Image (spheres, rainbow, N blue to C red):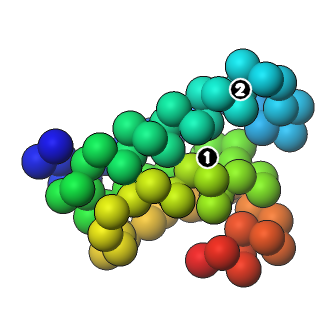
Amino acid sequence: PELCSLKLQYSNVDVRRLTPETAVGIRCLAGQLGMLPSLRELNLGSSRLSGNLRQILSDLRAPLESLELAFCSLVPADLAFL
C-alpha cells in the first residue's frame, strides 16, 4: 500500500478485442490500483488501452502527479476523461 510509483508498460492485453475475461481483468486491475493510496506515478506506456482509461483509473484514491500514456492508442473518450 505504500507503493508510490508503478510501471506497467507493454501490456499485451488487447482491449480492442474485449472478451468477458479481459473485462474482468481490467476491473481487477482497477481495483488493485485503488488499493494503492500512496500511488502518485503510473506508467502505462505502450499498453493497448483504447476506450478503457476511465475504467482503469476510476478506483484511484488520490490524483496522480504523473501519468505516462505514450503509445496507448487513446480515443476521444479517454481524452475527455483526462
User: Horizontal and vertical percent for residue 63?
Assistant: 35, 73
* In front of the other: 4 or 27: 27
Residue 42 shown left or right of residue 1 in the figure = right
Residue 27 shown left or right of residue 49 in the figure = left
Q: What element carries label 1?
A: loop
Residue drawn at x 83%, y 32% as measured from the top left: 18
Q: What element carries label 2?
A: helix
Q: Is residue 60 above or below residue 21?
A: below
Residue drawn at x 49%, y 36% as measured from the top left: 29
* In front of the other: 30 or 6: 30
User: Horizontal and vertical percent for residue 32?
Assistant: 38, 38
* Real-space CA distance between mark 1 and mark 2, rounded to the nearest whole angstrom: 17 Å
Looking at the image, can residue 45 be seen? no
Residue 13 sits in which quadrant? top right
Q: Which mark is residue 46?
A: 1
Residue drawn at x 88%, y 31% as measured from the top left: 17
Q: Which mark is residue 20?
A: none
* In front of the other: 26 or 12: 26
* In front of the other: 7 or 57: 57
Q: In this view, does 65 lie above or below 20?
A: below
Q: Which amino acid does label 2 sit on?
A: Thr
**Among the two numbered marks 1 and 2 on one chain, the one whose residue lies closer to the N terminus:** 2
Please rate how many residues cluster around mark 1, counting C-alpha atoms within 10 Å: few if below 14, some from 14 to 19, many from 20: some
User: Horizontal and vertical percent for residue 9?
Assistant: 49, 41
Q: Which amino acid does label 1 sit on?
A: Ser
Q: Name the residue under label 2.
A: 22
Residue drawn at x 86%, y 39% as measured from the top left: 16
